[in-house]
Amino acid sequence: MQLLEERIQKDGIVKEGNVLKVDSFLNHQMDVKLFKEIGKEFKRLFGNEEITKILTIEASGIGIACIVAEFFDVPVVFAKKSKSKNIDGAVYTSKVVSFTHNKTYDVIVSKKFLNENDKVLLIDDFLANGNAMKGLIEIVKLANAKLIGAGIVIEKGFQKGGAELREAGIHLESLAIIDDMDETTGKITFRKQ
Amino acid sequence: MQLLEERIQKDGIVKEGNVLKVDSFLNHQMDVKLFKEIGKEFKRLFGNEEITKILTIEASGIGIACIVAEFFDVPVVFAKKSKSKNIDGAVYTSKVVSFTHNKTYDVIVSKKFLNENDKVLLIDDFLANGNAMKGLIEIVKLANAKLIGAGIVIEKGFQKGGAELREAGIHLESLAIIDDMDETTGKITFRKQ
């Protein structure tokens, strides 16, 4: 997605440890106008599929998922990262290792909001090693729901998540795939799509 | 807001400890269509003000804030609840006591995304004791930005947050104010607005 690649090139900052900071428009400050273009693009890519629900994970996936959901006219469910007082009763649980936060946590979704009749599109801001996505896929499986596909804003193509998900036959669409980034020059190389 | 009160009455569940579960449409599963009506209403209530940025707090405020932001055509910034690898450099910090999670945490906003030129509308899903709001107001002050007001979806009118914020002269608009709720009968009483 041309507009997105240009924005990453312009405002993304490459930091050591394979970190790409896009917090000025994607996951701390959020450019909702850009999110609308992202929603439009996911609608183009998944518009032929029947989708009943969008599933994402807190926190930075939520804003994008909500704007994307406007284009599909479905509710969003976000997986929560820890058990809070407000969640009770039956939940689906999976474990996720966080690259960003360097720890393992449980993600949970209430059984009330995902079941065997759901056709689920996963949405998230980043795909690197794919741990969050694998956690969400596990939850879709536990719910006996149908996984339609996964829409990612930025995939780090030099990490294994994308390749593994595609190999597993999942319909994965990443709007920008970074094949290489250099923290000394700041150069970001996108995969041709 | 009639539509919201009806939805709370229909789908909200009153639990012991003054907990109102609205996780089927507000803060776990999210009814994005309802969010659009909420956005429209906040636009009606704050539409005469100049606003440059919407500030919310992760996680459940983010979705609502993004949909509201579409009506104001401004970016959203969400305060983060803990220091992650992806945030560096200068941040504004305040401390928040969470009613839901029963603990104190730091909330942080990068100094890059809030400054003395900003006119800020705060948005959140719930207002009870007002701790999250006070944390966000503190951050607006630290940034020397102008606080335009606060838009809340559901205020628990029987807890002190709303009264304190109004007393402090803050333009607070809560779309539904609950004056009483009874966990045995499930009855919810709304304040007439």
Image (cartoon, coloured by chain):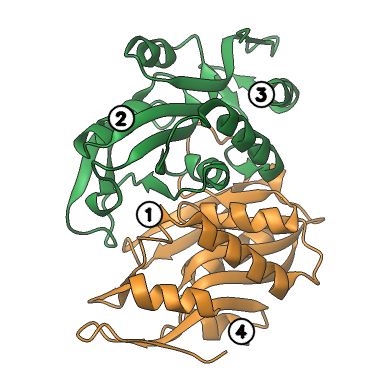
Chain colours: A green, B orange
Distance from the alpha carbon under mark 3 to that under mark 2:
30 Å
Whole-angstrom CA distance, mark 1 to mark 4, is 29 Å
Q: CA distance from mark 3 to mark 4?
A: 41 Å
Q: Using the image, tell me which numbered label, if any, was put on residue B28.
A: 1
Image spot of residue A103 (x, y percent): 32, 31
Residue under disc 1 on the same chain as residue under disc 4: yes
Chain assignment, label 1: B
Q: Earlier in the sequence, mark 1 or mark 4?
A: 1
At 70% from the left and 48% from the top, the residue drawn is: B75
Discs 3 and 1 lie in a common subunit: no
Residue where numbered disc 3 is placed: A13
- Could you tell me which secondary element the residue under label 3 belongs to? strand
Q: Residues within 10 Å of mark 2 (few under 14, many from 20)?
A: many
Q: Give the number of the disc on residue B166.
A: 4
Q: Badge 4 sits on which subunit?
A: B
Q: Nearer the viewer, mark 1 or mark 4?
A: 1
Q: Between residues A39 and B119, which one lies in front from this camera angle?
A: A39
Tell me the distance, in whole angstroms, between the alpha carbons under discs 2 and 1. 18 Å
Picture quadrant where residue A6 is located? top right
- Secondary structure, mark 2, is helix
Against A96, is A77 above or below? Answer: below
Q: Amino acid at mark 4?
A: Arg
Contact (CB < 8 A) between labels 3 and 2?
no
**Amino acid type, callout 1:** His
Q: Name the side, left or right, on which B120 lies relative to A128.
A: right
Query: In the image, what residue occupies the spot 51% across and 42% down?
Result: A65
Which residue does the numbered mark 2 point to in the structure image? A137
What chain letter is assigned to the residue under label 3?
A: A
Would you place residue A74 above or below residue A177 in this image? below
Position in image of residue A131 (x %, y %): 34, 25
Q: Is residue A192 visible?
A: yes
Which residue in the rendered view is the most extreme toward the left? A90
